Each structure stands twice: as structure tokens, then as C-alpha cells.
Image (cartoon, coloured by chain):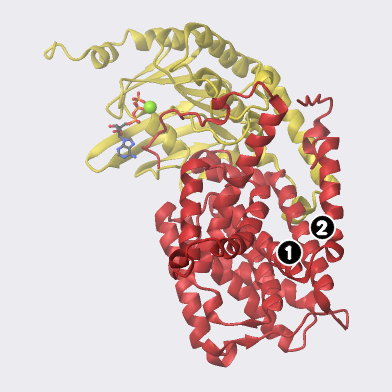
Amino acid sequence: MRFLFKTDYGQDLRLFKHRGQVFWYAVLAVVLLAAPWWASEYMMTQLHFIGIYSIVGLGLMLLVGFTGQISLGHAAFLAVGAYTEALLAAAGWPFWLTLPCAALLSAAVGVVVGLPALRLKGIYLAIATLAFGVIAEEILARWESLTGGNSGLHVKPIELFGARLEGDAGFYYLVLGLTAACCVALANLLRSPTGRAFVAIRDSEISAACMGVNLARTKTLSFALSAALTGIGGALYAHKVSFISPEQFTLLVSIELVTIVILGGVGSLHGAVLGAAFIIVLPQLIAIAKDYLPAGVAGAAGLQSTVFGLVLIAFIVFEPMGLYGRWLKVRTWFELFPFYRKGMFRRQKTYMKSERVR
Amino acid sequence: MRFFGAENLGIAFGGVRAVDGVSFELRRGEVYTIIGPNGAGKTTIFNLIGLIYPATTGRILFQGRELTGMKPHRVAELGIARTFQNIELFEHATVLQNLLIGRHRHRCTALWQELAFTPAVRRAERAQREAVERVIDFLELAHYRDSLVAGLPYGVRKVIELGRALATEPQLLLLDEPSSGLNPEETNDMAFWIEDIQKGLGITVLMVEHDMSLVQRVSDRVLALNEGRVIAEGTPAEVQSHPAVIEAYLGSKEEA
Ligand SMILES: Nc1ncnc2c1ncn2[C@@H]1O[C@H](COP(=O)(O)OP(=O)(O)OP(=O)(O)O)[C@@H](O)[C@H]1O
Ligand SMILES: [Mg+2]
């Protein structure tokens, strides 16, 4: 068991709370930096996708997990990022320009999509964003002169400072660097006034407003930042798959993205990364499991979606704190051994809340 | 200049006139209490001042500015803080974070600085923390500093809410039933704090309260409300012995 003695307010402002954390993050960094040496080509591809989905997951986590606004249309931001990147790269723009453009354009669309969030809540907001996602998909398919319609678009490889970024390793380091940068930027934001305002809106809009939080501005900002991150993810995704078409940005993808947040653990940045890793690895596990399943089950169509659905339900029912919550419990168990009590993480009933001022 | 004035405030919910032509003024530095039976419209007055509901009639003036028509967050920025009758805390955040949100109106850093957590942000955060620690000392909350709000006892939550309001460094503090649900000892603490807030910090307090002994003890003036209308105003003793107030609380003679 570790006791932290605090002797200075600065200690609470640090990203890493103690030496142990620094050590483990350093180990993680070394392992990840060395990946091109230990990972097979196949694993490298998985790592690319985990990085990309982590960035998207972080974006959605900011919106859903920290600001409490649901979105079932995030695949559309992914699409905005991907198509912007593809088109600008085709026009010969360098990557260091196309990526910010993809992020900015997504953010701008995010601001527009955030407008209903100023009036709608919960399920109604979910429906509004869902509708947006469907409309965006339709536009991609119909605006053939720009997007190539259903026949899709080829994406040129990344050009960085005049040189082509080729091979798995180069792209890997790019994704890794961006993922790490996004993690740090969000962690910074969440320990600053703006991040606290997000959390305030999530927990109680009325008292956030009474503390001087500008609800409209803050919610819009959250949508914009979330969309920007998703757009960055989309741009990287476009280069990774090198061919994009509308059916890669359907409602199902939006739901998959929300799954990242829920599986990972609503309200934690670690959760976004864990959730992303899980969602990439799960299909592989299913593929492996298929060999051991009876032919009737293994060959059944929709096996993967069924498993996804079941896992999602299982998490919501049994582990609402997600993978990160599960990890916290395991860690606490070890730290406190043999004194762990069963009810330690049980959620407390909250007191009656005022319904009148909603 | 007048410190605070409500003029002819009114709002109706459907057919119910929850507040009907209420006017009162606050002097800087006093404790002013609104009393009245359940459903009299006391909380609704707070919600009108906080611009949670738009007033149908009347206007609110604070330090020479008219609040009516502004957005709710502007009220806080101008220096009015409040607590809620049914505790509205940020449940999934720690006590410290809750109080820090109280500092929101004093923030001074831009988004890009926060994303990079520049030294300016670090300095600002330190200053905010020092301000919050003063509130923690004042309300003796040190023990709970790092606990999550969800799961803390009711009495503590009430104090945290008071702390969050104080962290905004308001000029006017609205307290909605600060003693409801507290035991006698906690009520006594609350009375001390209210006196300290008025005398020590020089903050004007507008309070809604049912506990008459607390009202007697801390209030300079009292306003009695019934069915949305003012029925009496004056010193605590005057209002308590006012026939209309007694009638409102005990029911009219014909009914009895
Ligand atoms: N949002 C609302 N919609 C409809 N009616 C409301 C609303 N808010 C308040 N009311 C009504 O207005 C009247 C005054 O309510 P208010 O909450 O101000 O009473 P109160 O004086 O604070 O009572 P209590 O002592 O029980 O807290 C009540 O009849 C209540 O039902
Ligand atoms: Mg009330």
C-alpha cells in the first residue's frame, strides 16, 4: 500500500503523482518505441489501428465521458477528417498542412452539430446526432464530383517535409507521437479550468451555470475539440487503409466508437486507450475462437456483431466503470491484500435531486 | 448606489402564480431572510434572481446593473453565488475539484495555454488552489479534501456547497435553507459560519430558512411570503409576531 504525503500544492498539479507512475510509463514508452523490432508485420498493423482508434476514443471520451453529451454521429467526423485528408493530399498539399486542415474542418462541423446540444439532452441528443451521421453518410455517397460517391477515393501516402513516409515503422511513429500528444493535451486540459467546466456540465448543468460556466460556449467547445480529435483520427485512418468510401463511415461505426468509451470506462482517459485496444483485438480473438467452435456457430453470419453486443451489455450490467475500473479494482486488491472488502467500489445512492429546475 | 433590488417580481407556472409582485431591497452587508410556508415561492425567487427562470414581470438590479435578460452565468460573474435546497454538487468529482469549479469566474488562462499546461497555467492553478484552501480552512473541510462527493454524508455536502459558493468570492450569497436536514450541532456551526461570512468576509447574505431560532439569531431583516406575495417585512421579532404571518403558518381562524 502506498501513502502519498503531500507537502506542496504543486504536487496535485503534476501529471504523474509518484515515482512508480513515472517508472511504468517509461517502461510502456520503451516497449512501444521498440515495437518495430519486436512486433510482426501483422501486429504492427494492429498497433496502427489501436493508435488511430485511441485518438478517436479520446475525442469521444471528452464529449461523452467528461462533458456528458452523447453522440451517435461520430463516424461523420471521422469521415470529414478522412475525406479532407484524401482530397488535400491528392491536391499535393503536404501532411503538416493537411492534418490541421482535417482537424479544423471537423471542428467546424462539430460546432454546427453541437448546436442542438444546447437545447437537447440524453436520448433526444442521441437521435439528433444519429440523424446527422446518417445525413453525412448520404452526402458522401451523393456528392460524386467531390467524394467519388460509392466508388470511393484512393488516398496517397503521407508526404512529410518533401519525403514520402513509407513503411510500417515511419507511420507507426507518427501515429504513436500523435496519440501521445493527444493524451497529454487532454490530461492537461482536464486539470485546467476548462476541463473542470466540462465535468461540471456533466454532473449538474444548473450548478455549473450558477458557478459562472457559460453552458453554450463550453458545450460547443467540447463538441469542437471532440470532433477535431476524431478528424485527426480520420485523417490517419485514410492513410492507413489507403482507400475510403461511404460504407466505412456508417452508423455501425459510430456505435463502435461509443463502445470504445463504454468498454474503456466512461470518464477516464486510460479507458479510451484501453477501449480502443479492446475493440481492435476482439475481432482477432473471435477469429481465433472460431477454430474451436462447432461449425454451425462459427460459420453463422453476424457472429462478430453478436459478440460485440453481448460484451457491451455485459459491461454495462456488470462493470459500468469499464476496463479501467476493472483494472483499478484489481490494483486495489493487490495493494490492500488481504484487506480488500467486497463493497469497496459499490456506488453510493445519491440523495434526492431537485426535479423542478430541470 | 443601491446594492440589490427586486422590483415587482412575478412568474406563473401554468395557472399557479408562484411569485406575484414581490419587491424588496438588500443593504450591503446585511443578512436578509425570506420565510414562508411550503410552496410560498421562496426557491422560485432564488431561481428568478439566478435567471434560471425568466421573470414574467418585474426586474432585478444589482449594483446599478439590470440582471433581467442576461444569461445565467453572467449572474455568477457579477458576484452572486448560491446554494441549492436539494444540494446540486458535482457528484463524480472530489471535494477539491468542486471547490475549484467555484473559482471558474476568476480563471485567466486561454485554451491553448491549458492544452500545453504552460507555466502561466501552473501559476494560475496554484493561486486558485490557495484561494480554495482558505475556504477549506474556514469551513474545516480539510479532512474531505480528496474524497469523492458521491458518498459523503448529507451534512458535509451542505458545507461543501456553501464552500463552493464562497470560493467564487461573491458579493451576494444566496442560501436556500442552509440548515435543512442538519442536526442541532451542525445547525449551530452553520449559524456561526453565516455570522462570520457577514461580519468577517463582509458578504451580503440573502437566505431562505425555516428554522426560526436560526433566523432570529443571524438575520437583520426578514421578509415573509405566502402564496407568492409579500405579507410582512421587518426585524425578525416584528415579522414573527405579525398577525398575517401567524395566520399564514397556522391557517386562518375560519378553517381552524
Ligand atoms: N418549474 C416549476 N414548474 C411548475 N411549478 C413550479 C415550478 N417551480 C415551482 N413551482 C411551483 O411554485 C410554487 C412555489 O414553489 P417554491 O419551490 O418556490 O416553494 P418554496 O417556498 O421554496 O417551498 P419549500 O419551503 O417547500 O421549499 C409551488 O406551488 C411549486 O409547485
Ligand atoms: Mg424551496
Q: Closer to the N terminus: mark 1 or mark 2?
A: 2
Q: Quadrant of residue A108?
A: bottom right
Q: Residue at x 35, y 43 (%)?
A: B57
Across and down, in percent, residue B107 comes to 71, 43
Inspect this view and state whether residue B3 appears: no
In the figure, the shade used to draw chain A is red
Q: Amino acid at mark 1?
A: Leu
Please state which of residues A326 and B243 is positioned toward the viewer in this rendering. A326
Alpha carbons under labels 1 and 2: distance apart: 9 Å
In the figure, the shade used to draw chain B is yellow
Q: How many marks?
A: 2
Residue ID for mark 1: A47
Find numbered disc 1 in the image and state the secondary structure of the residue it sits on.
Answer: helix
Q: Do marks 1 and 2 both belong to one polypeptide chain? A: yes
Across and down, in percent, residue A171 comes to 80, 72
Residue ID for mark 2: A32
